[in-house]
Structures are given as structure tokens and as C-alpha cells.
Image (cartoon, helix red, strand yellow):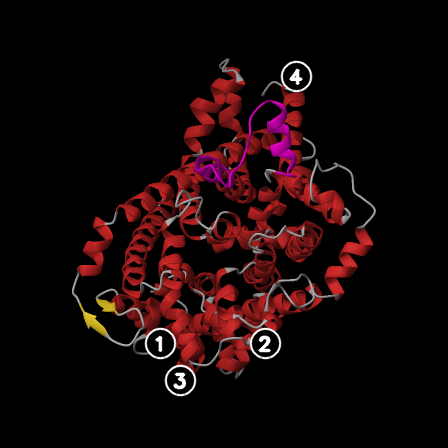
Amino acid sequence: MVENRFGLRLLSHAVLWLGVLLVALPLWVAFVASTQAEGDLVSGTLSLWPGDHFLDNYRAVLFGAADVSVNVSVARMLLNSLIMALGIAIGKITISLLAAYAIVFFRFRARMLSFWLIFITLMLPVEVRIMPTFEVVANLNLLNSYVGLTLPLIASATATFLFRQFFMTIPGELLEAARVDGAGPIRFLFDILLPLSRTNLAALFVIMFIYGWNQYLWPLLVTTDDHYYTVVMSVQRMLAVGDADVTWHRVMPATVLAMLPPVLVVVLMQRLFVKGLIETEK
Amino acid sequence: MHPIPVFRHRWLPWALLAPQLMVTLVFFVWPALEAIYQAFLVQDPFGMSSRFVWFDNFIQLFEDPKYFESLVSTLVFSAGVTVLSMGLSLLLAVMADGVVRGASVYKMLLVWPYAVAPAIAGILWMFMFDPTIGIVAYALEQIGYHWNHRVNGDEAMLLVVIAAAWKQISYNFLFFLAGLQAIPRSLIEAAAIDGARPFKRFWTIVFPLLSPTSFFLLVVNIVYAFFDTFGIIHAVTHGGPGTSTTTLVYKVYHDGFIGLDLGGSAAQSVMLMLLVGVLTVVQFRYIERKVQY
């Protein structure tokens, strides 16, 4: 057996707690800053305990215009982010599920070609083909719209692969049995395959929701109208004030609000999240 | 291919594939081809006319010392992020694997930064290092070091490395922990009976057995540092001061949208696509190898 020494265990716990604190420190500092009065954030040192402006600051950014440079409330931005994240997550899952279904359960010409075409998208992250993608979206008149925010991002090789892997583990007898009972392809998809994929769907949804919520470059490019700003990109806009002082008492509540929803999703749905994370990388 | 019996239908598979294929063609393949095409063109500054110039854009790119500098910055940045975040996560994962009680609590307290957007992670750290009101900058001042990442390029680089590594710790931690937990206890017990102390056991048994996980994470972290950290750079430094934190991906954006050098930006896009291609192949080779175990 392996020795079980008290000292070693103590050391492990100490290192882990140090790690936890180090990881949490930026969040704590941001929260503290978001509760301070305007004047306390201009000069001097920041206190490490929350101030008494929690309600004032959050109410101001949530319901009023977020900042001088961003003329829309954070509540509106959160709504935009939610629409984008849900659109991307649901869109990705739907089209990938259908595509994987076609590739696994049908035989048709150009099956492998379609598969490879989808595979290529893995190699083309938005960041490397920004200019031409932007032009395509501009030509389609999709700038400053929810469709423009979501549609170009919903093709997903990862999700298609994941569903393909999963569908291939479905025993053939199941399909035979369904066919004997007179179920067609659509019936089989909805009555048998979807219920079986429930956990996979949920796990993937968690990952894709976070992916969608955290989009930065794309919303930055396709939105010039404040009313379509998402919260993650707006925080940067609020910082870009040129020579004026950064209004930290506005930026920090917005920052905390921007990370709250995805962090909550991860914390509350941790099992699904870990499953999704490990499976999407397989 | 596989033994699953299949449906036969004339148009249904196409209807099912259509949405995915449409999106892929319109928003991925078309822009990619466009990028390749533009890489061979030179446009006048007003976008009125363009002319085919063969490989001039690429030659210009390779002769441009700025591009080389940006490549070096990217390599420094990636190496920093990978070493820092993998090192810390491995340490934490080994410790979490060792504790009997509370491993799941630690897991919960360590994984949440995964959900923070890169740009937000950058802003959190930028605030802590803010030369006037940041607490870390204040602490450094107390020990006599004057921190100002807006002026000092090395400090700016360190700041973006820290922010990017911080966000990646959770991911690496999860995979290292899973890798550690897959190592058979009997091997470690056998070594313990033979008298190997914990430190020795780690280097001679655990670390080698963990190498598939480490290699996988190495590729993932490099891909992350290259392509997913645009938000951090853009929100924190804008590639500056000077060009000290201009990574390749940031340069594509900067030259295209701010410099309006379409041909040059497209040529850089093509180079990056080649790079992603290579990294993807490496990743898949690794996966194939894993399957053969």
C-alpha cells in the first residue's frame, strides 16, 4: 500500500487551497471593485472588502445607459448575448445532429465528400478568415442583425463528429426492429435516436452555450449599432475611452455581469459540462 | 465501414445535410477561397481596382521584419501560456489526485474560469495590474518595482500571458486529473513497496504514463494560444505597446481592418490556415495512435 503521511496530505491541501485562491483572486477583486463608489476607483489603493455601492452601481449599468461610450443598458446587452448564445447552441446542435444522422444512417453518393467538406470547417476558425467572412456577411446584408451574429458561427465539425461517433455505437438491431415495426427514417430519429441522445445533447448544449456567449471578435465586427452589442464585447468598448479616465465603477459591474451566466452554467451543470468537454475533444 | 443497416431514400439524406452544407459553403468555404484569391491581388487604397500579382504579397510578407517580429511574439506568448498553465495545472492535478477527501470540491473551485471569455479574463487581470489602482501593481510598488504595462513591452507580454494561462488552467486541470485517475493504483503501490518515495514515483512512473495526456494538452494549448486569445490581446494591449504583443492572429485583424491592406491580410490568413491544417493533422495522428492502445 502507499504510505499515507499526514505531512504530505497537509501539503496537498495547502497547495490546492493556494491554487483555488489564486484562481479566484481576479474574480474577487472585480467584485469588490464593482461595489465601490466612483471616487474610490480613481486613485489610491483599492480596498479588499466590498464597498457599499453594490446596488447603486449595478442598478445604474443594468437599467441606464452603460457608459458614455456605449449608449445601451447592460440588461439589453445581456439579452443580446442570451439570444446569440442560444441561437448558436441550438443552431449548431440541430444542423450537426441532422447532418450526422444523414451520414451514419443513409448511403448515398458523395456521402464521404460531404463529410470531408464539414471536416474542413475545423481548420478554419473565424480568426483566420475574418476579412472575407465579414465581406460575405456584409454582402448578404446581415450586419447589425441577430442572424448575422449567429448564422455564420453555427457550422460545427466538432458537434457533427460527436454525434457521428455516438450514432455509430447504436446497435443495428435497434434500427432493424424499428423498421420491422414500420418506423421510417423520420420516426426513428424522433422516437428512438433523440431520446437516446439526451445526455449527449445536454452536455453539448452546455459547451456550445459557453462558446456562443463568449464570442468576441465576431460581434465586434458585425455590430455597429449599440442595440445589437453583446455584453462580452461591450466591456471592451467601455474601456476604449481614449484619454478620458476609465469609468471603472461602470466597467466592473458590467464585467461581473458578463461572466456570471456562463460561470453559473458551469458550476450548476458541472457533470454535464465535464462530460461535454471531454467528449468534444475526443 | 460499419455494420449498421441503413435507410434508403432518394432525397431525404440531402435534405438532412442541406443546412450544415449550406452554412459551411457560404460562411467557411467561400470566404476561405476568397482569402486565397485575395492573397494574390493588390488593391489600391480606395478599393477601386485590383491587380493580380502572383506571390508578391507572400514575398512582401516574408521580407517584412514586422511579420517576423509578430511570429516571434506569438511563439513567446504561446510558450509562456503553455508552460505556465500546464505546469500549474499539473501541480494542482497531482495534489488533487493525492487527497482522499475533497477532490470534487477542489474540482468545482478550479474549473469555473473555463466559462470566462478570453476578453473578460484579460480585463480582470488588466484591472489587477492597473498602474494607478491595481492591487498587484500596488504590491509591486511596495517592493520597489514600478509596473507599467502600457509603456513596457515585456510587462505587457507577461500580463497577457498570465491572463491567457489563468483561463486555461481549468481545462488542463480537468484533463490531467482524468489522466492521473486512469493510472492503475497497483503500479504506484508496487513502486511504493519497492521503496520509491513520492517524488521519485512521480518522475519514474506517473509522469511517463501521463505523456499521452500531456502531448494532447500541448497541442490543445498551442492551438488555444495561437487562435483563441485574440480577445485578450485586443482588450488588454491592442497589440502594443508598439508591436510587442502583436500575435499573428491579431496582425491579420489589424492589417485588414485598421491598416486596410487586404492583400497582405489575406496572405496572412492563408499562412494561418496552413498552420491550422498542420496542427489539426498532428492532433488527429495523436488520436489515431491513442485508438491503437
Describe the element under mark 4 as helix, strand or loop: helix
Describe the element under mark 1 as helix, strand or loop: loop
Q: Is residue B243 above or below residue B86?
A: below
Q: Are marks 3 and 1 on the same chain?
A: no
Contact between marks 2 and 3 (CB within 8 A): the answer is: no
Q: Chain letter for mark 1, please.
A: A
Mark 4: amino acid = Gly
Mark 2: amino acid = Asp
Q: Is residue B41 left or right of residue B3?
A: left
Disc 3: which residue: B9
Nearer the camera: disc 1 or disc 4: 4
Nearer the camera: disc 4 or disc 3: 4
- Where in the figure is residue A193, as x and y percent of width and height? 54, 71
Q: Quadrant of the C terminus of chain B?
A: top left
Disc 2: which residue: A191
Residue occupying the far front of the picture: A243
- Where in the figure is residue A147, as x and y percent of width and height? 53, 76
Task: Report how far apart the C-alphas of labels 2 and 3 lie in the structure.
Answer: 19 Å
Disc 4: which residue: A7
Task: Report how far apart the C-alphas of labels 4 and 3 lie in the structure.
Answer: 67 Å
